[in-house]
Image (spheres, rainbow, N blue to C red):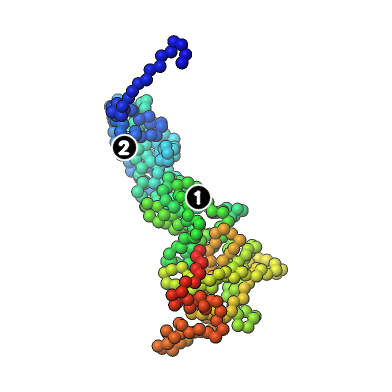
């Protein structure tokens, strides 16, 4: 300790802190901690407002309060602090109506109206007109972007969000969206997925305290995609799965047993064989890979064929079922023979039929889920 200096310790109890009056500094955007008694300098009155959705503006009626001849109002985004969403507007005491119109670009749950009198450290009144508005909540999930060069799908919330985001597979209209493994991320910050397949059935699912929303960014826009077809193979007793794509890609095939209201039960993947580059019609998507499947296995009752892309991190399948029009013979049974047909085994059935029989008979065959 330096000579001549005196060090004084003040002992303050929690009760002492509770008696302190701490004014709120508006520029900090902070509220008082629990246990402290806060006291405002003056009551600025209450703001009245109307939302004009057609003009995308909020009409504000500024209160008349004694001792505060001038008043500021602004729109801001309530993040950690309230970030400007427009320049503050000064309302003079000489104004007759004391009403202003504040335009906005987008309805968001965190878009707030803030007002304060033009005095030092004035308390600010804050109102968020769209905080619980369903239409404003829907806007949060529309900021999804795809970057073709890096094949990256990203989403960044315009407002603070608490919840989870995941990729999911939606097989068809009205179906549940099945979450892809290892795709869940927290939603409070920017979310991105690298090497994403641009299939229309690949979607984003947002799960928050407000509810759940699904967005399928590749469904309405024109993105490069691939296609799988099933036709009779030149090899006798086989079906051929052919893949068409305008860009290089690698594929695999699963034979799956369709189950009601659940993901299909699938067997291990079969890798498709690449074809040499097409030399003709370059404008159409050329056939780039194929795989021949034993007809008796692919045409078994309840079997679907799934095609997957394997050279990306996140992909969803194209699934083809009811293959009678694609080379499978029509299946016709006799009345009263349903049980016999379900448990009978074709003479030359392979692993796909054995897996199907285990599933129907309570077995524990391997399941591959998206």
How crowded is the residue under tag 1: few (<14 C-alpha within 10 Å), some, or many (20+)? Answer: some
State which quadrant residue 19 falls in: top left
Q: In percent of the image, x 44 and y 54: which residue is there?
A: 206
Outermost residue on the right side: it is 279
- Answer above or below: position of 59 versus 123: below
Q: In percent of the image, x 50 and y 84: which residue is there?
A: 345
Q: In percent of the image, x 39 and y 50: which residue is there?
A: 136
The percent coordinates of residue 228 (x first, y second) are 58, 70
Q: In percent of the image, x 39 and y 46: which residue is there?
A: 109
Per the image, the residue denoted by label 2 is 47
The percent coordinates of residue 200 (x first, y second) are 52, 63
Which mark, by number, is residue 191? 1
Disc with the residue nearer the chain's start (2 vs 1): 2
The percent coordinates of residue 342 (x first, y second) are 45, 82
Which mark, by number, is residue 310? none
Distance from disc 2 to disc 1, alpha carbons, whole Å, reads 37 Å
- Answer above or below: position of 200 versus 339: above
Give the mark count: 2
Q: Secondary structure at mark 1?
A: strand
Which one is in front, 33 or 76? 33
The percent coordinates of residue 149 (x first, y second) are 61, 53
Q: Is residue 94 visible?
A: no
Q: Is residue 280 left or right of residue 252?
A: right
Q: Secondary structure at mark 2?
A: loop
Tell me if label 2 and label 1 are in contact, CB under 8 Å: no
How crowded is the residue under tag 2: few (<14 C-alpha within 10 Å), some, or many (20+)? Answer: some
Which one is in front, 7 or 265? 7
State which quadrant residue 292 falls in: bottom right
Q: Is residue 287 left or right of residue 331?
A: right
């Amino acid at each position: 300790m330096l000579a001549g200096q005196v060090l004084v310790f003040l002992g303050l109890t929690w009760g002492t802190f509770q008696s302190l009056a701490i004014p709120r500094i508006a520029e900090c955007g902070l509220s008082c901690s629990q246990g402290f008694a806060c006291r405002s300098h003056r009551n600025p009155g209450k703001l009245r407002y109307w939302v004009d959705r057609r003009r995308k503006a909020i009409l504000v009626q500024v209160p008349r309060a004694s001792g505060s001849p001038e008043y500021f109002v602004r729109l801001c985004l309530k993040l950690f602090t309230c970030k400007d969403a427009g320049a503050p507007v000064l309302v003079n005491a000489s104004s007759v109506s004391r009403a202003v119109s504040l335009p906005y670009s987008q309805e968001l749950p965190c878009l707030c109206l803030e007002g304060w009198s033009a005095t030092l450290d004035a308390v600010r009144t804050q109102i968020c007109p769209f905080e619980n508005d369903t239409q404003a909540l829907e806007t949060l999930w529309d900021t999804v972007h795809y970057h073709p060069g890096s094949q990256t799908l990203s989403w960044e919330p315009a407002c603070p969000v608490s919840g989870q985001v995941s990729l999911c597979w939606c097989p068809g209209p009205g179906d549940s969206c099945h979450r892809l493994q290892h795709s869940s991320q927290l939603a409070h910050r920017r979310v991105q997925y690298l090497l994403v397949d641009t299939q229309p059935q690949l979607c984003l699912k947002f799960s928050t305290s407000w509810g759940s929303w699904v967005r399928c960014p590749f469904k309405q826009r024109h993105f490069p995609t691939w296609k799988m077809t099933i036709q009779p193979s030149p090899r006798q007793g086989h079906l051929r799965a052919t893949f068409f794509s305008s860009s290089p890609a690698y594929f695999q095939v699963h034979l799956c047993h369709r189950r009601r209201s659940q993901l299909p039960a699938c067997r291990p993947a079969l890798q498709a064989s690449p074809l040499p580059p097409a030399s003709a019609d370059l404008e159409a998507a050329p056939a780039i890979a194929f795989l021949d499947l034993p007809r008796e296995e692919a045409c078994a009752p309840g079997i679907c064929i799934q095609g997957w892309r394997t050279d990306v991190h996140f992909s969803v399948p194209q699934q083809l079922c009811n293959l009678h029009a694609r080379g499978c013979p029509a299946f016709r049974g006799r009345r009263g023979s349903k049980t016999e047909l379900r448990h009978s085994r074709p003479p030359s059935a392979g692993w796909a039929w054995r897996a199907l029989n285990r599933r129907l008979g309570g077995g524990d065959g391997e399941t591959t889920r998206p």
